[in-house]
Image (spheres, grey):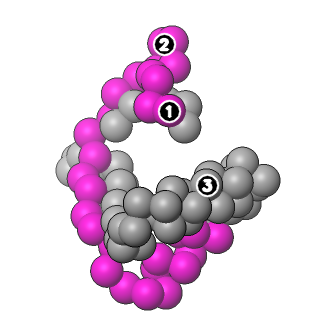
């Protein structure tokens, strides 16, 4: 893992840390993740969700979304 902005651009001098990702398949964890994103990005997050919803309506697509939980791997001593 490496620190980046919301567009995936790696920040200068950011160090790398080993990590593991997993798909979130629990409804409560999904709600928690969305709350965290809403808290972090505020109005920007709401606007992106509305834009996404509008595009899905125009394109007549389903509302499939995947949330991935990424956690650092702690090295054993």
Residue 13's disc is: 2
Q: Is residue 74 magenta?
A: no
Task: Residue 37: tell me if it is visible.
Answer: no
Q: Which residues are magenta?
A: 7-35
x 36%, y 55%: residue? 71
Along the polypeptide, which appears first: circle 3 or circle 1? Answer: 1
Observer-side mark, 1 or 2, equals: 1
Q: CA distance from mark 2 to mark 3?
A: 33 Å
Taking 17 as reference, is 57 above or below it? Answer: below
Q: Residues within 10 Å of mark 1 (few under 14, many from 20)?
A: few
| Residue where numbered disc 1 is placed | 7
Residue 27 position, x and y percent, is 43, 87
Along the polypeptide, which appears first: circle 2 or circle 3? Answer: 2
Q: Nearer the viewer, residue 17 or 29?
A: 29
Q: CA distance from mark 3 to mark 1?
A: 16 Å
Taking 76 as reference, is 4 above or below it? Answer: above
Residue 4 position, x and y percent, is 49, 30
Q: Furthest residue to the right?
A: 43
Observer-side mark, 2 or 3, equals: 3
| Residue where numbered disc 3 is placed | 51
Q: Nearer the viewer, residue 30 or 65?
A: 65
């Amino acid at each position: 893992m490496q620190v980046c902005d919301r567009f995936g651009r790696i920040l200068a001098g950011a160090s790398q840390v080993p990590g593991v990702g997993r798909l979130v398949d629990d409804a409560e964890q999904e709600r928690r993740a969305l709350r965290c994103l809403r808290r972090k990005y505020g109005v920007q997050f709401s606007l992106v969700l509305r834009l996404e919803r509008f595009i899905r309506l125009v394109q007549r697509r389903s509302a499939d979304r995947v949330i991935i939980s990424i956690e650092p791997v702690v090295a054993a001593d």
